[in-house]
Amino acid sequence: MVAFKEKLKDTSLFRTLYIIDLFFCNVSFLQIPAYVFLVPLFLWGVRLVILNQRRYNTFFKLRFGLWIGAFLVVSLVTILFNYSITLFYSLLMLLHVLICFFVFYGAHTEPDFDFRKELYFIAKLIIYITTIANIFGMFCLMFGISFSWVWVKFPIYENRFTGVFVNPNLLGFCSVVAIVCCHMLSKCSFLSNINKPSINRVWLAICIVTNVFSLVLCDSNASFVLMIGYAIVYITYIFFADKLGLTASKVVLKIVSLILIACFIIGSSLMFRSIFKAGFSVVTSKTNAMIDILFDDDEIISEKENNSSKQETSKAVTFDHQNKNIDSGRFKLWKESIDLFKISPLIGISNGNIIFYSGEYLNGTLKFSYHNSDLHNGFLTILVSTGIIGFSLFGVFGFRFAKHAAQHLFLRIDKVFRNDVYPCLFSFLFAYLFYSLFEKALLYDISFMVMWFWLMMGYTSCYIAGFEPMLETQYLFHRDRLTRTLL
């Protein structure tokens, strides 16, 4: 019993279990038990917020915590000012935000915390689970094994590959995360710091190939942007990491080269996606027809031989969106969000009232359903929820964090640093900002994609805290009041 109580105080264990459970919330056949298990985990996280404040004085050690505190105060005022029947949901989201800030982002406030070991374990687990799941999904796709029940559409969902995941967009995001994890676990300096063996290169190659194929076949445009953005940001870092010998002409040359490389990456990626989807569609239709011939009786075989080409054309999976609108209905949601913003532009309407106010005062575009329960834009969601004041405070926090993160990325010139995971973390976070323009991301959503972002923020903050140890001892106004870390 004593050992169990000690485990309940382990913030690292909570983060690991919470992020893995949220990952399984994306898996069709495990979604219900994962959501059931999420309830006690969520309560555990709220308890740790309070416990860590008592143990570690989390808020006053939090990097840029002053802006976080002001944002939380505005959020609470907004909830109370916009009191409605959705009050419970708004308060639930506020508790979720506390977990994001104080347990995940606040990992750097925990004394003697070795975040590298936690990152290694989680990244390794994500690689194995995602790769095995995608291999299984592709096997079933190739051999015509399918299953459909209520929300479970396996392995094809609306003409797109979804594998064992609930939605193709979730598959796309998990595939990108797995690829990034492969990149991080290939960093020799990172592995040597924790005395961990490197992952088998063959297994890493299998992981990258299967997840790239899954990313292409799921046809998730937002996840595709995330992957391309990650690659471009990381290449930008490689170009400008070494400042020795840089002149104005070399800087211009590198910028032009980067633009050309970015254009090449985007163009070749789009071309590869189109060609691969078309080719894999043909392969899938042929293998499925072969399976039908092997297992169907003679009468069915005879019938298929007479009109096989027509049937193959109608049954072929093209891995393209059925909805041909490039925005997939997002423009309609964003237009509604502008009218929601006008209701209370200064302090917002609180996150819980987004759907409620849409039906109560506007056109009712936003509904309580999987697809329409969010603005599908993380920045718009924060703006509508907390207004100009809350959005500005969150923006200042984000700018301060990005400024310090970028400084340490480009000011350090030692080669050992380049072989660590810090550039990978920075590249993912930067690319995720573009991803947040199109998905339910950034803050107000209890999901794997949101919590993975804050997990990466937490690990990055651990690096920043390690680079700036003197900030802990610099105080503003008075020793017993504010430390400079809060700013």
Image (spheres, grey):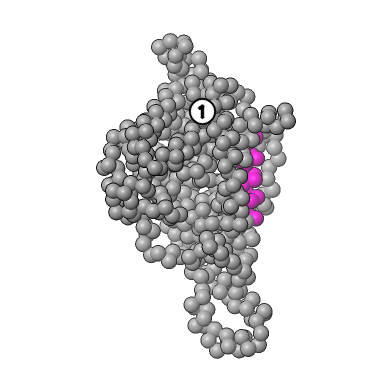
- Residue 244 appearing in the image: no
Q: Amino acid at mark 1?
A: Ile
Residue nearer the viewer, 346 or 219: 346
Report the residue at 47% width, 26% height from top: 63
Residue 12 figure quarter: top right
Q: Position of residue 112 (x, y in %)?
A: 63, 24
Is 470 located above or below residue 423 in the figure? above
Q: Position of residue 312 (x, y in %)?
A: 52, 79
Magenta range: 117-132
- Residue 132 appearing in the image: yes
Residue nearer the viewer, 31 or 23: 31
Residue 392 figure quarter: top left
Q: Secondary structure at mark 1?
A: helix
Relative horizontal placement of residue 30, taking residue 215 as reference (left or right): right
Q: Position of residue 349 (x, y in %)?
A: 33, 39
Residue 480: say if magenta: no
Q: Residues within 10 Å of mark 1 (few under 14, many from 20)?
A: many
As drawn, the residue found furthest toward the front would be 85
Residue nearer the viewer, 125 or 357: 357
Could you tell me which quadrant the N terminus lies in? top right
Q: Which residue is mark 1?
A: 464
Could you tell me which quadrant the C terminus lies in? top left
Is 472 located above or below residue 168 in the figure? above
Q: Main secondary structure of the magenta part?
A: helix
Residue 128: say if magenta: yes
Relative horizontal placement of residue 38, taking residue 346 as reference (left or right): right
Residue nearer the viewer, 141 or 265: 141
Report the residue at 67% width, 52% height from top: 203
Report the residue at 37% width, 40% height from top: 84
Report the residue at 51% width, 73% height from top: 316
